[in-house]
Amino acid sequence: MKRFFSKKFLKGLKIFLVIYFLIGAALYFFQEKLLFHPEKLPANYRFEFNTPFKQVDVPLDNETNLSIVQFTVPDSLNKGVVLYFHGNKGNINRYAPFADHFTRNHYEVWMIDYPGFGKTTGKISEDRLYTDALILYKMARSRFSTDSIIIYGKSIGTGIAAQLASIRDCRQLILETPYYSTQSLARRLFPVYPSLLKYELKTADHLDKIKVPVTLLHGTDDWTVPYGESKKIIEEHPQVKLISFKDGKHNNLHTYPKFQQAIDSLLIY
């Protein structure tokens, strides 16, 4: 009887280990599909929005394009520019409605699509995300002074925004639903696996290098990027300000009057 159960146990253990390693391999090799959910657009696609904007395509080489949309305000009212790094779904069309939070305060909003999103082409990687962000910043600097540039990240874009603010001057950094790092987030979602991520996106690690104000916006009922990620950030970086939204989820903070009030107060010149 003891021998029978021993064999049964070993067989079950083998099955468990096979399943464990198969899931781990899938998490590693298909992590781009888990992290990023892009919607591509054809090269000849023309954006259409109800607010004034400019569509800019930057050819990085013969095969690679960087797609940018600049939501504009009249020059006579222009206070600066918000460099907006969006979330992991769709393309600029999904995030364009949020530009109004800033244009109503007389700030232009410049959004880029990541590789594979919208009209941006090429292979996605962490280095490419940082490189494209720097290109956007350099374009902004050709028109705006550093104290007129605000860097804004939403969800997956918070790691990109934080890295950019750590290497280039700006007026302030605003992070909506940020994560401490993608590894920290992965440990919450897949605690039984060691770090398997090719994308580190260490948001918190960049904050000590940033000398301008940093503000976090996070809902307490966010299941996608748990509120605990922001709490962890401010525990280690007390200079960072956290604005919480009671019962707020990952994609509905913009529906809170407090959210627009927070944006308005942060954009006071």
Image (spheres, rainbow, N blue to C red):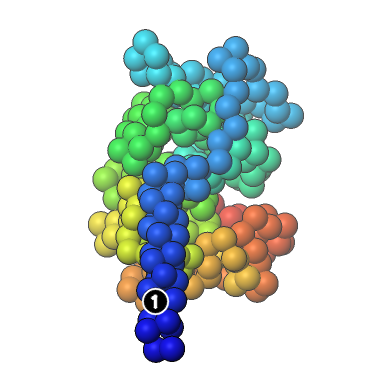
Res 85 seen here: yes
Q: Quadrant of the N terminus?
A: bottom left
Label 1 residue SS:
helix
Q: Residue 137: give x, y in percent of width and height.
A: 37, 34
Q: Residue 269: give x, y in percent of width and height.
A: 50, 50
- Image point 37% across, 10% down: which residue? 62
Q: Is residue 88 above or below residue 50?
A: below
Q: Is residue 138 above or below residue 23?
A: above
Name the residue that disc number 1 marks.
7
Q: Quadrant of residue 13?
A: bottom left
- Seen from the viewer's position, the closer of residues 116 and 265 is 116
Q: Quadrant of residue 107?
A: top right
Task: Classify residue 257 as left or right of residue 221.
Answer: right
Q: Residue furthest bottom?
A: 2
Task: Classify residue 130 as left or right of residue 216.
Answer: left
Q: Residue 175: give x, y in percent of width and height.
A: 48, 56
Q: Is residue 265 above or below residue 140?
A: below
- Image point 44% across, 71% down: which residue? 12
Q: Residue 78: give x, y in percent of width and height.
A: 55, 35
Res 136 seen here: no
Q: Quadrant of residue 208?
A: bottom left
- Seen from the viewer's position, the closer of residues 62 and 164 is 62
Task: Classify residue 3 as left or right of residue 73.
Answer: left
- Seen from the viewer's position, the closer of residues 186 and 51 is 186
Instruction: Name the residue type under label 1.
Output: Lys
- Image point 48% across, 73% down: which residue? 228
Label 1 packing within 10 angstroms: few (<14), some (14-19), many (20+): few
- Seen from the viewer's position, the closer of residues 179 and 58 is 179
- Image point 40% across, 18% down: which residue? 64
